[in-house]
Amino acid sequence: MPMISLAPCPAPSPSESPSFSAVESIAASFFASSMPLVTPALLSTSKSGLCHSEGKMVLEERERDGLVGFEREKEREERFGGGGGHGRRWEEERRRWKQKWRKLRFDLHDISGAKQASNYLIGLGSYDITGPAADVNMMGYANLEQITSGVHFRLRARTFIVAERQGNRLVFVNLDACMASQIVTIKLLERLKARYGGLYTEQNVAISGIHTHAGPGGYLQYVVYIITSLGFVRQSFDVIVDGIEKSIVQAHESLQPGSIFVNKGELLDAGVNRSPSAYLNNPAAERAKYKYNVDKEMTLLKFVDDKWGPVGSFNWFATHGTSMSRTNSLISGDNKGAAARFMEDWFEQKGFTEGFDTLYFNKSEADRIPRRVSTIVPSPNENRNELMRLASSFQPSKGRPATRFLSLARRVRNALRQADRPQFVSAFCQSNCGDVSPNVLGAYCTDTGLPCDFNHSTCHGKNELCYGRGPGYPDEFESTRIIGERQFKKAVELFDNASEQLKGKVDFRHEYLNFSNLEVSLPKVGGGKEVVKTCPAALGFSFAAGTTDGPGAFDFKQGDDKGNVFWRLVRDLIKTPSQEQIKCQCPKPILLDIGETKEPYDWAPSILPVQILRIGQLVILSVPGEFTTMAGRRLREAVKMVLTSGGKGEFDSNVHIVIAGLTNTYSQYVTTIEEYQVQRYEGASTLYGPHTLDAYIQEFKKLATALISGKTVEPGPQPPDLLDKEISLLPPVILDATPPCVKFGDVKTDVPSNSTFKRGELVTVTFWSACPRNDLMTEGTFALVEILQNQKTWAPAYDDDDFCLRFKWSRPAKLSPESYATIEWRIPGSVVSGVYRISHFGASKSLLGSIRHFTGSSSAFVVA
């Protein structure tokens, strides 16, 4: 049986070792509830301390001895005791015994981590930020037709706070959103100031987006980012600000002494370079230093509470949130959100769920996703006729009034949570993903199946037919699962083997800079310096071509450094760029001069934040955009050189530097100057001209110098607060209605009567519903799968935060007040047999504006 290793530790002093009394206490509790026949053999556990390798070997040896003892006793009873049913009883006892051993292993692992000398206060938090699941354009692809209409799984804000016991502290928030937003950051900081005074400010708070392209838009303040969402969407904005604040409050209130461990490792097959022709324009000598044309390294932090053991993990890895396509309309955290959901579920059930080791570490079972239902209810009798009899007695329940609390109370993870310990928080953060696609099979023409043109990503000269293929092609949900699972499995590996403890200062530096006219000093080829400048923001023609993850329209193509006359005429109707701007942005042909367009208010940002966060030997570079692979490498190397060459030896070559992309605000892409010349999508979207990366490197070197010297930096010019100027053209919900004699929550299309389903099959139920914008069901659920327990009680099994359950909402006509909720459950392979039903929760709006909650349930059915 594959083992989850105990955390390795150096030869500790007696004061650092987990005392045998603690180990003995756990063991005694374990053995007291175990079968007497194996207790004597197992109680001879070594007293050398179980975080040592010899302790681990003893633990494994005792487990093997116990399993052998089980088999001998089973054989003896079968030979001399006779009687049917003994085999089943022994298998059940053996299963329970294995679960207890698994729990013992993890408890000992938690002690070994917690007994390290902790030097920080750590706190973690998580809160629902799932926005409006209807009528709102999604942020990312800029596709006018991509309108939310349901939930794949929920979005969350996940936070960690690290504080010195008497000194600095910092906050890092990871959003299941496309990117951070300047106006979200501004308003969140105002709330934190009102709540905590000067404890949390723009200096020590970082808010980063995972870059999912399947979340509601309308929460940014600059015009160019809210055109497709019909302007500002207050509901999208509010739920994100509320969720971030609540996650920070949770983290703040849970601050306890603890330790942080760091680990890193290589993850293959989770990202490919979608602009390889631009990457090849970088110097050959520079490219030769790297094995791959994308970064393959994941860096993970493991948070270990002194009392509770591991309580969370955050990792950084570069791959785009574009496993879900531009035609998807279900809210989804894409591959990184999926990975976070998998890892949090994994931790909550580890050591308790039968089959845990098989689910995650047996290659023959590598594609299975964790399930929790067997930890909530006991496996029922698998007599199919009895299950059918039970199911037939439960007909669909009519739609009925409900309270919002009912949706919250029925959430699966509320039932699963161990009340006596903190929730485990796991975040999969974004890094320098600018040219990294999760569609790892490559880009192909949809009509011929042949690879797209290498330089321009076109098919027959057009971009519309060139699409990247994910590993689950043609199923985007499967691609999302696979890329998410690959990140999740690597994170588990790094988590279980994290042994390098972070030690040292908590510190930070932050500055606002005007990137529209920033002077940059560069070395000349023949010696000396030259001063260049960044430019006001502008988008090139290739921006409109899109990428292989989401192609654009019309006759645009990537790699266009000339443009054409027709689109220049269209551009000039909006804003004609000045000759100075054209020269500054060269060789980018300007399609939209957004930096100099101010009507009705700013189209693009000019003032951007740069920020460095330090936790011991880990340094986080918070950047407000999408750096390409080589751009990120250059930035990390430049900062590393500053840190290791100064600071009185505080940093050595083993300093860990990660880039947190799309952080604090959003300003699109950053390429190298060589990639900029090629003018693929990323170069055309590098807003501030060819010297954008040089400007970032210059300013981050200044921040790094200030960090190691203990000097302060000037705050810089403040970004604008445009909230009062925002325009919203999204119509409100006017009215929800049902046909005569039909109630909200009634079943429209039920499961077949007396139906039985098998694992892997799809169960579909449709309800009469109302617009999900009436209540976002924050920390609740629109959809629920319930299992019958004790022949009379329905227990929650799966909800709309589960990968296997999809909530889809639709109207029979665009302006109809009637609507449907279709709930699809793809039955997992690890589900227990039993009687199930599907329930729906919603809220309707009357003509007078009152909101009434409702619920309804399908007929019962059998899963056998």
Image (tube, grey):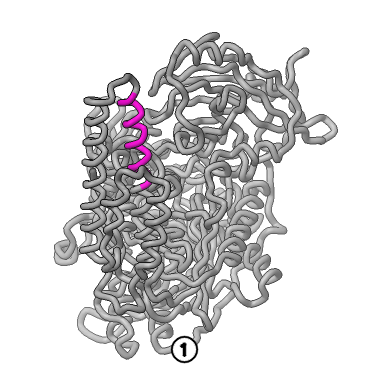
For the record, the magenta segment spans: 86-100
Indicate yes or no whether the magenta region holds residue 386. no
Tell me the quarter of the picture where residue 452 sits.
top left
Q: Nearer the viewer, residue 190 or 822?
A: 822
- Residue at point 29% right, 48% down? 271
Q: Is residue 771 left or right of residue 109?
A: right
Tell me the quarter of the picture where residue 843 sits.
top right
- Look at the image and tell me in which quarter the N terminus lies: top left
- Residue at point 45% right, 48% down? 348
Q: Position of residue 134 (x, y in %)?
A: 61, 35
Residue named by callout 1: 711
Q: Position of residue 471 (x, y in %)?
A: 29, 36
Q: Amino acid at mark 1?
A: Lys
Q: Position of residue 270 (x, y in %)?
A: 29, 47
Q: Nearer the viewer, residue 644 or 339?
A: 339
Is residue 513 visible in the rendered image? The answer is no
Is residue 9 visible in the rendered image? The answer is yes
- Residue at point 49% right, 17% down? 862
Q: Assign the magenta stretch its main secondary structure.
A: helix
Q: Is residue 328 above or below residue 768?
A: below
Indicate yes or no whether the magenta region holds residue 94. yes
